[in-house]
Each structure stands twice: as structure tokens, then as C-alpha cells.
């Protein structure tokens, strides 16, 4: 009698727990649906004979996975006792409302059955196919470029860095829209303190959402009001793999085709993949050419303004007559003349960037020729200034990084103003202020002008020059790597 009573009590307890579980599951389902009220793209499918309800966003899931992993097994189940597919490893049981909501937003489907709730990952919205990067073209070497999917980007990095020491930390960022940010480093090569500092910087971000890697850099920079970018961004997997092997940290932002490299120096912005894929003599020559282009684009127009305003004696006699004849009909001072042409060129550059590719190229070429010729004939500017401004514009495109090129162009306007006010003295003052500004910058705590300042002698084999690989025996000092030997 006592045994029968015990069994009865046990059975009643199980029935009570089952009823509580069903109530909890129904409550959870109701709360989830209420959270998505007003979302007309939410799909809610109910199968009464199986007591199953599935909830998902149609445009966030892969239709083939939805059909094969979920709908087909449901259609083949005749009653509630034949649901073995719910015990598969891809079905994750949870009773956390937040996890269910986040899962649906990430492309998972929520399955509500009796007193249980499951999440199954069937995400697969259409993604841009892997294509060559439009901002980082290369003549030799790989041509793959990153896309907006972090999963694809991480897979491309993994394929190039085939090491179990490559570690990936995922950090959710965003108060309104939770986005995933991934911090990558190679354990045993990267400095653990630098890795921890980067993770702390990202975790401290308080913002509604982070949409792109360029946006993230402005939130984690040491000096966010500086003129120059403090983090290098690349869109090529081979460049990211090389940075990881050097001991640097890489940050991948979901939804962005650009990947952050930390720390970065000023001189990293003048390096490209072609430097390393071509012979070292060719790589050295092209790198020196870029530094020469930097000097021309930042100072050529300022030098013209200074010379034609204050220091005519610096102009050779044979050129002075031509320049005087060219400027004889120009009603503006050299400073105003130069500013008018430089601003007009920026208008053309911006118009060409915003218009469709074919139209933009036409506007840039035709607009430059027509406006330049018309300006000379109208006496608004001189022939010599057109050559100077055109040379400065062309050399600005030699700088591989668009972000750095834009910063250099802004610095050029400052030098032009100082040259128009103080002449050569103004240029010298501007250069000194520029050097002081660059010297004061740091990238994730690392000196921005390394290996020039501070002076790292061993890093000069890959600085102004691109030495043969036989001489590159140590990793750069900038990342403060714990494993300095690159080549045994």
C-alpha cells in the first residue's frame, strides 16, 4: 500500500513538473512573439498535430537548410512520439528568452515543442562573393579580398594561418544592435599585454552599433582627434596573415570588408603586397618612389606659393621669364590662385568618387582637362600652377592607403596657407609642427614613427628599403612580440 502511494505521489509530481514546463514554454513563446510584434517579416509556422511552433526571419535563413534540417523531418513525423530529430546535436535546448531572441536575430530558427525550446542554426542570407579588393589592387600575388561576412573573412585567414596557436576572441559590441567583433592573435608570438589592452578597449565601447572597421578605429584610437589614422586597415587576407605572423593583432568587424591591424606605424601605410611578391630591388625602388610622392604631394604646391610670393630669386632665370608671362594676366595672389585650383580639384575628386564608376572616371578626366584649360585661357590661373597642382594630385594617388592619402591632402592645405603668409619660413614651421604631431602619436601604445623614432636598427631592412628575405631574420620591434626570431 505504501509503495503504491509512493508511486502515485511520484507520478503526480512528474505531471505537475510537466504542466509547469508547458506553462513556461508557452510563456516563453508568447514573450518572444511579443518582442517581435510589428515585425512583418517574422515567420511563425504552427503544426498543431505535433504541438510544434517554429519562428524565424525568412530573409535571414538558408531556404535549403530550413527545408532539409527542419521542415522535412517535421513533415515525416506522424505524431508527437516520433520527433527524434529534436535530439540531434544541431538542436540546442534553451529556456533563456534573451538567447532565443538573439538566436532568431542571428538567423536561427526557434522551435517550441511542449515544455522545451530549441534553437537550430540555419542562417544563410545571400553574401557578396569573394572578389579582388577594389581599394587594394595588386599586380602579383593573391587577388582575394575580404567581404562583409565575418565567417567568410575568418575562414580566409584560417586557410592562410594554419596554426592551432591562432586564437580568436569574440566580443559583442552595441547597445541597440549587437555586432560581433573578433580579436585575432597568434599565441606565443603576439604580446599578451597588447592583446589584453585591445580587448579592454573594445569591451569599454558604449555605442548603439558599430557598422564598420573604420568606425571602430575612431573609437579605440589613442588620439581620436589626430589628423592621421593610427590603425592600418587592409582588405587582403594575405596582408592580414603576414601581420599576424609578425606578432601584430588583427580585429575583424562583422559586416565590414576592412580588417584592422594593430599596432601600426606611419610607414606601414606606404607598403603594399607587391613590395614582397616582386624582387627586392623592384620592391625597394617602388617604395622609395612612394615616399618621394609623399614629399611632392604635401609640399609642391606650398613651395610654388612661397616662391612666387616671397622668394622669386630662387627661380632660375630661364624659367622666371616664362612664369612672369604666365602670371601677368592672373588677378589673384599666388595663395588665392593655389587655393582655388586645389579646392576645385577636390570637388572633381569627390564627384568622381560618388558617381558611378564609368561616369566618375569620365568626369575626373574631362573635367580636369576642360576646367584647367579654361582657367588658363580666362586668366584665372597660370600654366605653371596647373602643372604643380596636377603633379600634387597624381602623386597623392601613389600613396596606397586612401585614409592616409586624405590626411596628407588636408595637411597640404595647412602648408599652403603657411607658405602664403610666411614664405619658406612658413613651410619650415609647418614641417616642424607636422613632425611634432607625428612624433606625439601612438598606435595602441606603440610609437607611431617607429622604426625611425625611436630608432630600431634591425627594422631598417623593411623600412625605406625592402631587403632580401635572407636578411629579414627578426620580427619588427613595434608589436613588442615575445618571439623575435622570424628565421632560424
Image (cartoon, helix red, strand yellow):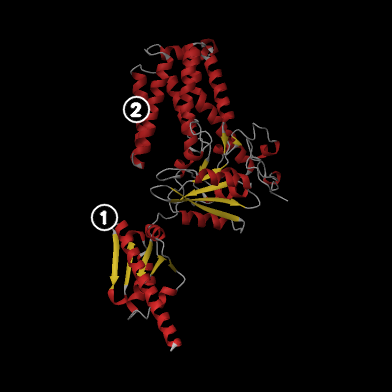
Instruction: Check disc 2 and report its element: helix, strand or loop.
Output: helix
Of residues 5 and 259, the one drawn nearer to the viewer in this rendering: 5
Q: Secondary structure at mark 1?
A: loop
Does 296 appear above or below 206? above
Q: Position of residue 151 (x, y in %)?
A: 47, 56
Residue 379 appears left or right of 298: left
Residue 465 lies left or right of residue 205; in this view the side is right
* Sequence-first tag of 1 and 2: 1
Q: Position of residue 245 (x, y in %)?
A: 62, 50
Tell me, for residue 370, which label it has, or none. Answer: 2
Quarter occupied by the N terminus: bottom left
Q: Nearer the viewer, residue 53 or 308?
A: 53
Q: Is residue 32 above or below residue 402?
A: below
Tell me the residue at 46%/41% (across/down): 214
Q: Quadrant of residue 281?
A: top right
Q: Which mark is residue 38?
A: 1
Tell me the residue at 59%/55% (across/down): 166
Q: Residue farthest to the bottom?
A: 1
Find residue 12 and report its image quarter: bottom left
112, above or below 183, in the image: below
Mark 2, other Cα within 10 Å: few <14 / some 14–19 / many ≥20: few
The percent position of residue 101, horizontal first and vertical second, equals 37, 58
Of residues 301 and 61, the one drawn nearer to the viewer in this rendering? 61
State the separation of the CA atoms marked 1 and 2. 54 Å
Instruction: Name the residue rendered at 63%, 48% in the picture.
Output: 192
| Residue 291 makes an appearance in the image | yes
Query: Residue 182 at x, y = what percent?
Result: 51, 51
Q: Looking at the image, which is closer to me, 175 or 465?
A: 175
Number of residue marks = 2
> Furthest-front residue in view?
2
| Mark number displayed over residue 239 | none
Q: Is residue 382 visible?
A: no
Amino acid at each position: 500500500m505504501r509503495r503504491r502511494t509512493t508511486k502515485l505521489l511520484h507520478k503526480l509530481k512528474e505531471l505537475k513538473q510537466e504542466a509547469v514546463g508547458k506553462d513556461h514554454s508557452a510563456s516563453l513563446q508568447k514573450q518572444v512573439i511579443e518582442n517581435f510584434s510589428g515585425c512583418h517579416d517574422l515567420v511563425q509556422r504552427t503544426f498543431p498535430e505535433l504541438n510544434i511552433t517554429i519562428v524565424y526571419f525568412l530573409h535571414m535563413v538558408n531556404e535549403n537548410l530550413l527545408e532539409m534540417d527542419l521542415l522535412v523531418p517535421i513533415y515525416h513525423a506522424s505524431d508527437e512520439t516520433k520527433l527524434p530529430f529534436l535530439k540531434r546535436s544541431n538542436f540546442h535546448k534553451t529556456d533563456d528568452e534573451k538567447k532565443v531572441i538573439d538566436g532568431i536575430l542571428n538567423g536561427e530558427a526557434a522551435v517550441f515543442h511542449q515544455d522545451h525550446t530549441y534553437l537550430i542554426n540555419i542562417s544563410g542570407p545571400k553574401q557578396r562573393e569573394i572578389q579582388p579588393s577594389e581599394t587594394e589592387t595588386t599586380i602579383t600575388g593573391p587577388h582575394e579580398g575580404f567581404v562583409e561576412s565575418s565567417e567568410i573573412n575568418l575562414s580566409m585567414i584560417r586557410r592562410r594561418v594554419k596554426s592551432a596557436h591562432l586564437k580568436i576572441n569574440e566580443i559583442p559590441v552595441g547597445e541597440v544592435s549587437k555586432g560581433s567583433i573578433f580579436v585575432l592573435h597568434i599565441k606565443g608570438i603576439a604580446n599578451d599585454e597588447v592583446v589584453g589592452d585591445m580587448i579592454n578597449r573594445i569591451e569599454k565601447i558604449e555605442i548603439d552599433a558599430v557598422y564598420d572597421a573604420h568606425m571602430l578605429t575612431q573609437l579605440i584610437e589613442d588620439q581620436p582627434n589626430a589628423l592621421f589614422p593610427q590603425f592600418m586597415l587592409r582588405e587582403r587576407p594575405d596582408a592580414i596573415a603576414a601581420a599576424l605572423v609578425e606578432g601584430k593583432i588583427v580585429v575583424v568587424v562583422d559586416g565590414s570588408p576592412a580588417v584592422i591591424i594593430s599596432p601600426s606605424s606611419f610607414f606601414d601605410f606606404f607598403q603594399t603586397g607587391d613590395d614582397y611578391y616582386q624582387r627586392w630591388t623592384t620592391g625597394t625602388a617602388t617604395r622609395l618612389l612612394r615616399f618621394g610622392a609623399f614629399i611632392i604631394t604635401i609640399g609642391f604646391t606650398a613651395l610654388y606659393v612661397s616662391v612666387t610670393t616671397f622668394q622669386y630669386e630662387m627661380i632660375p632665370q630661364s624659367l622666371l621669364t616664362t612664369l612672369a608671362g604666365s602670371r601677368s594676366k592672373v588677378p589673384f595672389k599666388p595663395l588665392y590662385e593655389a587655393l582655388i585650383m586645389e579646392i576645385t580639384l577636390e570637388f572633381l575628386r569627390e564627384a568622381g568618387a560618388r558617381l558611378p564608376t564609368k561616369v566618375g572616371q569620365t568626369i575626373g578626366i574631362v573635367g580636369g582637362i576642360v576646367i584647367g584649360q579654361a582657367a588658363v585661357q580666362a586668366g584665372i590661373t597660370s600654366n605653371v600652377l596647373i602643372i604643380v597642382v596636377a603633379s600634387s594630385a597624381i602623386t597623392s594617388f601613389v600613396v596606397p592607403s586612401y585614409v592616409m592619402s586624405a590626411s596628407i591632402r588636408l595637411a597640404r592645405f595647412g602648408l599652403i596657407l603657411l607658405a602664403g603668409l610666411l614664405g619658406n619660413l612658413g613651410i619650415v614651421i609647418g614641417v616642424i609642427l607636422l613632425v611634432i604631431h607625428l612624433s606625439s602619436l601612438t598606435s595602441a601604445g606603440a610609437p607611431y614613427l617607429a622604426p625611425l623614432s625611436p630608432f630600431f636598427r634591425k627594422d631598417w631592412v623593411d623600412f625605406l628599403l625592402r631587403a632580401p628575405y635572407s636578411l629579414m631574420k627578426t620580427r619588427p620591434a613595434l608589436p613588442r612580440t615575445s618571439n623575435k626570431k622570424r628565421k632560424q
